[in-house]
Image (cartoon, rainbow, N blue to C red):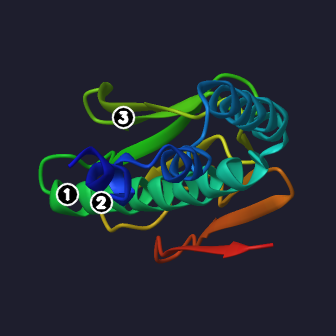
Amino acid sequence: MVAGWRNCPFFNGAEMKKNNSRAYTLTELVIVVMFIGIMAAIAIPRINFAVIRRSKSGTTVQKVVANLRRVRTLAISDAAANTDGYSLKMTGGAPYSGYTIVNEDTSTEVDTYSFDPAIAVTNGDTFNFGPLGSLVGGSDTQIDIAADGRSYTITITTATGMVKWVQN
């Protein structure tokens, strides 16, 4: 009976050694994990974060355009009670750190926004929309936004208050 067990492939010592040679040792696994960690430590600082900043500049442009249109809409919708209109005023020196939306009749702030420090916003200071939705005299008509090689220009048509933007 014992001789029968020896012929069984499950209990054959040579066969078991052959199966063990297919596995990885703990040392081999540790070396591979360390190698992957070293490669990641080298690669992560080389990731191009400029792409992320460019994306943020595009988002900033859309946010400013939306708020300029909002200020114009507020001026039109509140025209009966507010003859001075609403304005979007940049805060800080150029490059600006953010902007506020102001009710010109009551001089109260409606909203305040800030820009990411990696994004340069320049060229416009105050955008005052009157009750008809047009820019009031003395208002700026252009804003420039740039980050890592990508730049945008936002332009407001004085007579109509139409807001448009282009990528330069």
Q: Amino acid at mark 3?
A: Val
Looking at the image, can residue 66 be seen?
Answer: yes
Residue 79, numbered circle: 1
Residue 131, numbered circle: 2
30 displayed left or right of 43? left
As helix, strand or loop, the secondary structure at mark 3 comes to strand
For the residues bearing labels 1 and 2, Cβ distance under 8 angstroms: yes
Q: Amino acid at mark 2?
A: Pro
Image point (80%, 38%), residue name: 39
For the residues bearing labels 3 and 1, Cβ distance under 8 angstroms: no
Q: Tally the marks.
A: 3
Q: Residue furthest left?
A: 81
Q: Who comes first in sequence, dot 3 or dot 1?
A: 1
49 displayed left or right of 68? right
Residue, disc 3 = 102
* Residue 99 in the image, given as x and y percentages of width and height: 51, 34
Q: Amino acid at mark 1?
A: Ala
* Residue 43 in the image, given as x and y percentages of width and height: 81, 41
Q: CA distance from mark 3 to mark 1?
A: 15 Å
Give whichever of 30, 139 is nearer the camera. 30
